[in-house]
Amino acid sequence: MRNLSAAAACVASVLVAAGALLAQVPRPAAGGIETMAVDDVRPGMRGYGLTVFRGTRPERFDVEVLDTIHNFRPHMDLILIRPTHPTLEHAGTVGGMSGSPIFIEGKLIGAYAYGWEFGRDPVAGVTPIASMLAELRRPRRTPSGVIPGSGIPFDIAPTPISAPRARWESLSQSALAHRAPVATAYGSLVPAMTPMAITGMGERATQHLAESLAPFGIVPLQGAGGGGAARPPDDAPARFENGGAVGVRMVQGDISGNITGTVTLVTPEGVLAFGHPMMGLGETSFPATIARVMWILASERRSFKISEPVRAMGALINDRGSAVVVDPRATAPTIPMRVSIHGVDGAPHTDWNVTLAAQRPMAARLAASVVESALEDTVSDMADAAWTVQSRVFLRGRGPVEFTEHGAGAEGVRSLPAPGGLDLLTRLVDNAFGSVPVDRIEVDLTLRWQRDFSYVRSVSADVAEVDPGGAVELSVVLGRYGAGPERRTVRVEVPRELAGRELDIEVAGGTEVVPDLAEPETLDDLIRNVATRYPGDALVVSVRMPSQGVTLHGRVIPNLPNSALDALRPSASTESGDPFQSYRRTVVPVGRVVLGRDRVRLRVREVRL
């Protein structure tokens, strides 16, 4: 027994000694740099960080470890540090520094990423490098150097054409919850603000874009750089480096928008940056750039880097909770877009050409901002106006989908609805049927500076009763500014099915009537549905039918008898038609925009035998 005890003690001694030796072995290097685990970081330790204060070359700043917040996020700690640098003492937490690598004893511990809201001291939270490396090693669904694009749908069921789901709002709420993990009366420890430098965009467009991006911590900053040169300057870096500025290009051209962060670690597998999510989109595809910092603007509200892109360099391919990953070898898809405005004599700019990041859900939002900005810069007049908008979306392998829409208003084009092409873009990037690349978008707006529209004043008939199977002539009076009433006679057939019932007729402008459309079952159905609408320069006469119709397998079947409805809607199967109220509609061209609606009701006589 004593020999056994002695042997056990000997083995234990050997194991302890081996453990001590293993503890002294340096941790594996990442990207050629040795790392330090969170458990080895102690309060009072000193080191340095790297970031770009001006230009493109990273500079050192001193740091002191304050402490560690354990389990700050699920399975992730957060290291609190106090940076020391003249700029940071003045500016506090700086937007755009997210990702700045922090070193203790020459070992990388993580990325500068979090700060206190309203904090006066430059105290920051560091995302541990182990958490970031885990995101880098996460298997991708697509090979290295290839972008997944926007073909992975959010939905597994068709989106109703009449009630698209608020995907952006859902995504925004999720992002907002991520940005406030530790809420107190004194503010929250949140990811450092992510600046998006904007140039060439109007004030209202920038404000609306800022409202959309606020839940993600992305702040569009008007006039804060962002354009970048048409070609890289000679002294622009040719590769990413630790502590260098990294940009994410959302829109480029006459209007530019670029997000700025900092590179944490360059490895053969990819480039780690930010230390927190950009938008939390997971596997994604945004054009990436090397950026140049012009200045760090200190602000009581939020300090940030003013920067611009200087060289395109790969694509942001992963946007996760503890880091973003850039693949310098990848190329992100983009969408060229042109907006032209006609009928505005003397305007300094009537054409805008940009390139959008072709990534849902940003593409449609950015396209809307471009249109809004072009209008704001060119036609901000508060005046009577009528307009025609032609928008075309060129789909690869399918040709262009074209929309022609008319409108009018007493306040210029401030209330211009989104063109049909942008509606199609929104639905294409969030559909359940498959991917369809968008090659380019074109929007042409033609203005007429006059109150060139009519409105429905009244609808009347010279009889109170009509015969089934016969016809009735309606007198439609259209009002028009600066002119007398215009009377139109519209002949309406009286359905036989309405014998002994009421004939309910509505007359309305084309933009106010929604066509009867079946739920899409294919991508072609979806495109057809979005493109189907009544012309805005016409009257639509709708006769309410006594029976219902159904939509089934992508088809509209109107005005069915009850027996047919029962057959198409079996209670023992989910493969049934969706009912809708049937109307018989007639389109009457007018030649100018028609607004408003009115209706008349007549009695239909009984059928006499």
Image (cartoon, rainbow, N blue to C red):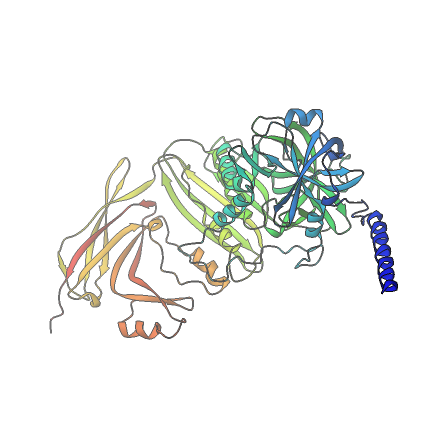
Image spot of residue 518 (x, y percent): 40, 63
Image spot of residue 186 (x, y percent): 53, 32
Query: Toward which corner of the image does residue 91 lie, by quadrant?
Result: top right
Image spot of residue 356 (x, y percent): 59, 45
Q: Is residue 163 above or below residue 72?
A: below
Query: Toward which corner of the image does residue 580 lie, by quadrant?
Result: bottom left
Q: Is residue 481 above or below residue 334?
A: above
| Residue 498 in sight from this viewpoint | yes
Q: Quadrant of the N terminus?
A: bottom right
Name the residue: 56% across, 40% down: 182
Name the residue: 31% across, 73% down: 566
Image spot of residue 309 (x, y percent): 68, 37
Taking 438 as reference, is 496 left or right? left
- Closer-to-camera residue (325/504): 325
Q: Is residue 532 above or below residue 417?
A: below
How many numbered discs sit on the rendered protein? 0
- Closer-to-camera residue (353/213): 213
Q: Is residue 145 above or below residue 105?
A: below
- Closer-to-camera residue (438/321): 321
